[in-house]
Image: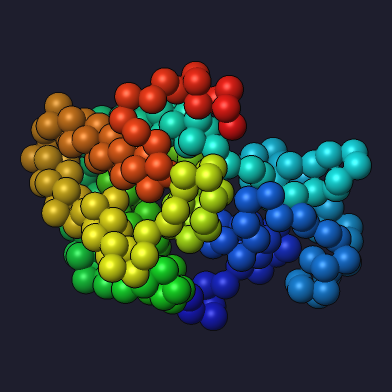
Amino acid sequence: MLANNEPRTPYDRLRQDILNGVFAPGDPLRLSALSARYKVSATPLREALSRLEEKRLVEASRNKGWRVAAVSLGQLEDIAAARRALERALLADSIRRGDVAWEAELVAAHHRLAQTPPPESPHADARRAGWIAAHDGFHRALLAAALSDRLRGFWAETLDQLQRYHDALLYRPGTLGRQHRPPGPEDFARLLAEVHSVEHHGLLKEAALSRDVESALRLLDEHVGHTLAVYRSVAGVPEGTDHQQERTTE
């Protein structure tokens, strides 16, 4: 990322490190180590950790202190369902309200996404950050004309959580159980293309610009559902596994 886009506050810096996988699910977050890393005192770090706990990015326990929140496939499915519900409402409203400026921003955001090269390997951190920014930027542009800032805020929180799962599934063996084996280099580009198909985003853009709410919602459902199916496959969970059963075995 560009230096002038780097987060400034301890909250922003810690949040970004969690989302980017610097701190993995379950990792301890010790105040002394964080203070040395970010060169700040314990007080703003405690405040940051409390805020991140509210966002469900960290967890606190009386005996173990702070840790990065754990992940599970059951939680991933719950987050994906929340994202679908929120994004459907925002997308329909945005299409109905969008003006010429919204159309121009949407076209520009899609062009930026199409021109942003995806990471070539699980270790291509700079490309990965650029791809995530372009991808999320497209979805934000798609929803930008919607009226409800509160719904958009809730939706942004689901994106943060989904980014954590993206990192855990593709980079961290065993995070979601013994069957979970992140893809090797030969499969990484294929899976990334499936999860973030530029072609599918193009169809979403065209439906939105045509003010075809029904088609846009159908394409969004397909996009979220396909992404979840890819994540389930990487996690080693067969199709048809009962959601409630997964929760009881995590």
Q: Is residue 235 above or below residue 249?
A: below
Residue 100 x/y as whole percent:
18, 50
The residue lying toward the viewer, choosing from 188 and 17, is 188
Residue pictured at 14% horizontal, 54% vertical? 199
Residue pictured at 41% horizontal, 75% vertical? 124
Residue 48 x/y as whole percent:
75, 53
Could you tell me if residue 214 is visible in this image? yes
Residue 140 x/y as whole percent:
36, 49
Q: Quadrant of the C terminus?
A: top right
- Residue closest to the far bottom: 3
User: Which quarter of the figure has residue 92?
Assistant: top left
User: Which quarter of the figure has residue 85?
Assistant: top left
Count of numbered tags: 0
Q: Is residue 79 above or below residue 162?
A: above
Would residue 238 be found to the left or right of residue 25 on screen? left
Q: Is residue 108 above or below residue 67?
A: below
Residue pictured at 21% horizontal, 35% vertical? 222
Residue pictured at 38% horizontal, 48% vertical? 234
Would residue 164 be found to the left or right of residue 131 on screen? right
Residue 29 x/y as whole percent:
78, 57
The residue lying toward the viewer, choosing from 198 and 237, is 237
The residue lying toward the viewer, choosing from 154 and 186, is 186
